[in-house]
Amino acid sequence: MTPRLPKISIIMPAYNVDRYVRRAVESLQHQTFEDWELLAVDDGSSDRTGQILDSIADRDIRVTVIHQENGGAPAARNNALDRARGKYVMFFDADDWAEPQMLADMVKFGDAHDLELVIAGFYIDTYYGAADQHTTEVKNCPDAVFATQTDFRAAAWRLFDVNQLYPPWNKLFLRSRIEELGLRFRPTFWDDFPYVLDYIRDVQKVGVISHPYYHFIRQRSESETARWRPDMYDKREEEHGWMLDLYHHWGLDGDAASMEMVQRRYAERLVGCIENVCNPKCTLSVHQKMAEIERMISTDRAQVAVAVARPHSRMMQMMLAPIRQRNAALAYREGKFISFVKRHNTKLFATLKANR
């Protein structure tokens, strides 16, 4: 007899998350909707992640654990995608958790409107200090079912603007469409964004649920906040190119609202790149840091971005001023200040970032 197929395949890469993974899986087990399979990929963890997942799978036939040598989240997700059987696919991070009604509401909505993509609201919980101290930020847009592909594309800038289109984990993807596209995660840093862009490039049937369900957890440990990424600027340049290409493909590179969002997004992330260079862990000398900042803010791309961007807050207007003025010295001082706040007052940094 052919085994019955689950409605949803939930894909969870897991690497050294033994402090959190049980909570993540239990939040799925507590869902009011029960017709799902969990494909949890232990990505060569050196802690107890694999054992915890195995013990859960022993007691729940819906949970399948895949053990692989450490290959990164893209390889883990792709491994699970090759085995997924559900009508829908959902991605889930092993240190996050979800409200009990999430799957039921999203499946009901997707089925009722025959959608290829269901997008729901989500929370960003940023933890700091001791115990369970955290800030909570809600990301959502009003309920909507887009009647046509054109309607979705015209409204997409609003979804991008509140971060609803970037991550893979607040969505239901239609698995038949994933396979039709041959879509898999690219072997790159920050792999989830290009995956979503590839999926939405020619998507037809999209709906949005305003209610937030998914809790994306930011654990602001000292090691994380102090981290320096030498390739961050190049990565942001690549991402901006993807966004420009997407909107050109959509025929909206002349749309004022869409282009303002794209350019403001780039300008705001350029501030993050400046802060990254100013991180004390950065191995460049002060002279080299200044030269790198000069290089970043003097490009035509940067100047177009700050000319078009209309920041939502006075704070962000001030942060973009050194770029607009091509003032590397001022941008360097600003970057050092942001880096100090990020490392020493996570609550303030998270609050300012949420209100930028």
Image (cartoon, rainbow, N blue to C red):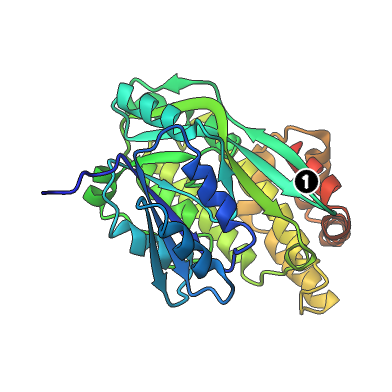
Give how far across and how far down residue 197 sits, in percent. 42, 47
Give how far across and how far down residue 92 sits, in percent. 49, 50
Give how far across and how far down residue 135 sits, in percent. 77, 41
Q: Is residue 253 above or below residue 208?
A: below
Neighbours of disc 1 within 10 Å: few (<14), some (14-19), many (20+)? many
**Outermost front residue:** 59
Q: Is residue 307 above or below residue 346?
A: above
Quarter of the rendering containing residue 256: top right
Q: Is residue 87 above or below residue 290?
A: above
Asked if residue 303 can be seen in this view, the reply is: no
Quarter of the rendering containing residue 201: top left
Going 13% across and 49% down the picture, which residue do you hit?
2
Specify whether 223 is left or right of 237.
right
Specify whether 19 is left or right of 255.
right
Q: Amino acid at mark 1?
A: Ala
33 or 117: nearer the viewer: 33
Secondary structure at badge 1 equals helix
Q: How many discs appear?
A: 1
Quarter of the rendering containing residue 263: top right
181 or 103: nearer the viewer: 103
Going 44% across and 39% down the picture, which residue do you hit?
171
Q: Is residue 240 above or below residue 35?
A: below
Give how far across and how far down residue 230 sits, in percent. 66, 72
In this figure, which residue is indicated by the disc labeled 1?
350
Asked if residue 161 can be seen in this view, the reply is: yes
Going 64% across and 61% down the picture, which residue do you hit?
19
Going 52% across and 64% down the picture, which residue do you hit?
52
Q: Quadrant of the C terminus?
A: top right
130 or 195: nearer the viewer: 130
